[in-house]
Amino acid sequence: MGNKLLKSKSKKINYTELTDHQIEMLVSTTKFSSQQIREWHHSFIRDCPSGKLDRKQFIEIYQQFYPQGKANAFCTLAFKAFDQDKNGYVDFSEFLSAIALTMSGEVKDRLSLAFSMYDINDDGTLDKKEIAQIIKLIYEINGKVNLKQELSPQDKARMIIEKFDHDGDKKLSREEFINGCLNDSEIRKLLAP
């Protein structure tokens, strides 16, 4: 019986501490220095004392970057992409990995993260409905209310599908999305700034 108690205690993860091993792993995967990682961790724990950032907290923080628009729905998608293990919260490693990717990652990696965010139904493709919904959310987050100069989200989505869909299935695979955005800077700026 004492063995069971010992096992259950050893499985408990302390999300507020950062071990040397975790720092080494983050240095190798994020390209941040160990000092930068410690600083990021200190700030993360200051803002999130439990070491776990739930969806509501994530949205509150993320919305600060988009004060001019409505960011709630877009932030929910970002949270889904950041929560890599799908446990309902973002821990420090997930947070820092996503920050590193968005700050200094390769364009292809950022586009892959964007694809993961935009694949709302998690089927590995983007259809016209998903793309239109994302464009609408991007317009909202940037505070675009008067869209008379812009194509509607549905028309823009149709145009993107027509331009990027190489296999004719009226959906975009991750590869089609990434390659299309790499070859069209205007659409890339819209979908993965």
Image (cartoon, rainbow, N blue to C red):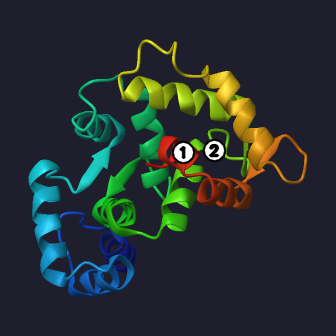
Q: Residue at x 49, y 51 (%)?
A: 81
Measured in 3D between alpha carbons, the distance from the residue under mark 2 to the one under mark 1, in whole angstroms, is 21 Å
Q: Nearer the viewer, residue 74 or 44?
A: 74
The image position of residue 159, as x and y in percent, is 73, 34
**Mark 1, residue position:** 186
Dot 2 surroundings within 10 Å: few (below 14), some, or many (20 or more)? many
Question: Left or right: where does residue 115 sit relative to residue 54?
Answer: right
- For label 2, the SS is loop
Hey, what amino acid is under mark 1? Answer: Glu
Q: Nearer the viewer, residue 57 or 191?
A: 191
- For label 1, the SS is helix
Q: Nearer the viewer, residue 7 or 180?
A: 180
Where 181 falls versus 29 (above or below)?
Answer: above
Hey, what amino acid is under mark 2? Answer: Asp
Q: Residue at x 66, y 33 (%)?
A: 130
- In this rendering, does residue 117 appear at all? no
Disc 2 and disc 1 in contact, CB within 8 angstroms: no
The answer to which image quadrant residue 10 occupies is: bottom left
**Mark 2, residue position:** 119
The answer to which image quadrant residue 46 occupies is: bottom left
Question: Left or right: where does residue 5 sit relative to residue 43?
Answer: right
The image position of residue 79, as x and y in percent, is 42, 45
